[in-house]
Amino acid sequence: MGRHTRPNPIPAAHAQAWDRFFFDGAGSITTIDVVVSDDFPQLQITDAFLSGDQFSVRVLDGGSVVEAFDCSVPTIEGDQIGDDYDAAFADDRWSSGEVFISARGPLTIEITATASPFGGGGAGWRLTEGDDPCRADLDGDGELTLFDFLAFQNLFDAGDLAADFDGDGRLTLFDFLEYQNEFDAGCD
Ligand SMILES: [Ca+2]
Ligand SMILES: [Ca+2]
């Protein structure tokens, strides 16, 4: 069991590249301080090197959990892929997972190794581009309610391009229709 801490926030300009982290056996925790921006809101985690490790991830704002997910279960132990994180992320022999982070600003990523057949290893993480899977939740309370509809209407009436849901740079009836579609589709 061990605890690794990176005290310095990773500059956003570096956030697109995969960065390596090391972990000890199962139960060890790695914490990484980041600054999350609109440019790179998608957190991706992947095991690399020898397959078989598995992770559980939380994103913390102070003491509050703002996102949490379990990485996939690796399908095999002991296959070697080196530090090719892109390949490992796409390959189900290596545990991986991702989440869209809604919160912005300084946050802490906490990665717990939940399985580690070789007693430790190396893995990768990065922040990258991503789309909000629930952008219809305009008031950000995690549910789609009448208040989100009202918030949309307010943005639209104010000429705020946050209401440009079809992304054509203008506010038209089609934004209303797109908003309604996403609202009806729900967030899960
Ligand atoms: Ca809402
Ligand atoms: Ca539009």
Image (tube, rainbow, N blue to C red):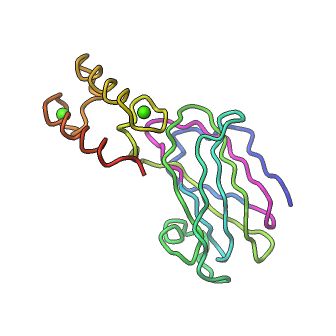
**Which residue is at a point 25% across and 16% down the rendered structure image?**
158
Residue 135 lies in the magenta-colored region = no
> In which quadrant of this rendering is ligand 2 seen?
top left
Determine whether, in the image, residue 153 is placed left or right of residue 131: left
Residue 26 lies in the magenta-colored region = yes
Q: Image quadrant for the N terminus?
A: bottom right
Taking depth in this image into account, of 42 and 152 the one nearest to the observer is: 152
In this picture, is 92 found above or below 37? Answer: below
Magenta region: 23-43
**Which residue is at a point 53% across and 33% down the rendered structure image?**
104
Q: How many marks?
A: 0
* Residue 6 image point, x, y percent: 74, 44
Taking depth in this image into account, of 22 and 119 the one nearest to the observer is: 119
**Which residue is at a point 53% across and 50% down the rendered structure image?**
43
Determine whether, in the image, residue 167 is placed left or right of residue 98: left
**Which residue is at a point 24% across and 23% down the rendered structure image?**
156
The answer to which image quadrant residue 169 occupies is: top left
* Residue 130 image point, x, y percent: 41, 48
In this picture, is 128 found above or below 37? Answer: below
The answer to which image quadrant residue 151 occupies is: top left
Q: Residue furthest front?
A: 146
* Residue 174 image point, x, y percent: 14, 37
The answer to which image quadrant residue 72 occupies is: bottom right
* Residue 14 image point, x, y percent: 54, 45
Q: Residue furthest right?
A: 1
Q: Residue furthest top?
A: 158
Taking depth in this image into account, of 66 and 37 the one nearest to the observer is: 66
Taking depth in this image into account, of 71 and 16 the one nearest to the observer is: 71
